[in-house]
Amino acid sequence: MAAGRAASWTVDASEYRDLLLASRHFPRDLQEQLRSQLGDAARPAARDAATAALRLGLPGAPRSKRPRVKRSTGLRRRMASSVRVVLRNAGNGVEYRVVARDDMARVTNKALFRHPVYGNRDMPWVAQRSYPWFDTAMRRNLPAMQRAAQDALERAAGRVAERT
């Protein structure tokens, strides 16, 4: 799993390689079912990552004694809405990539990140604590994603066998 902007995982589908290659010649309805089921395998992880982005706590300086003013820039919402699932064929299997396309997703997915004060690059930069919210969500969901993808491939193999 890659730290930063994207995490990906590959289902070990070496025994299904012929099936995956042959899937290009499946009837359209079988292709769509397989793709849909594989997408369903990764969607819970994407939802979990988006939820983690919305709950991300970014502690800063000690709280002010002045009344709290809402100063949201929409950072968490922007990072959460950038989480996507992307499918591609990879070597011996199918790779699903869960990606957070916002640049700040990569930056905040670390224990510590640096940024300019109020975005002013002429000012001194400060270090701010965070935690690997994206990687944590991917690690938590990896076993379930792999099982669901393996099940989808087995169901596709069964449907192909029924039709032949």
Image (spheres, rainbow, N blue to C red):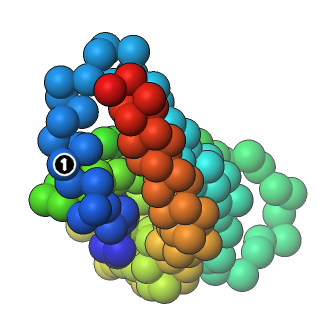
Quadrant of the image for the N terminus? bottom left
Q: Position of residue 148 (x, y in %)?
A: 55, 53
The part of the image, by quadrant, that contains residue 143 is bottom right
Q: Amino acid at mark 1?
A: Asp
The part of the image, by quadrant, that contains residue 88 is top left
Residue 129 in the figure: left or right of residue 114: right
The residue at 31%/14% (across/down) is 28
Query: Which residue in the rendered view is the most extreme toward the top?
Result: 28
115 or 99, which lies in front?
A: 99
86 or 90, which lies in front?
A: 90
Any part of residue 120 in sight: no
The residue at 48%/72% (across/down) is 135
Mark 1 Cα shell of 10 Å, populated few (<14), some (14-19), many (≥20): few
Q: Position of residue 97 (x, y in %)?
A: 34, 53
- Above or below, comparing residue 62 to residue 99 in the picture: below
Q: Which residue is mark 1?
A: 18
Quadrant of the image for the C terminus? top left
Residue 63 in the figure: left or right of residue 33: right
- Above or below, comparing residue 144 to residue 75 in the picture: below
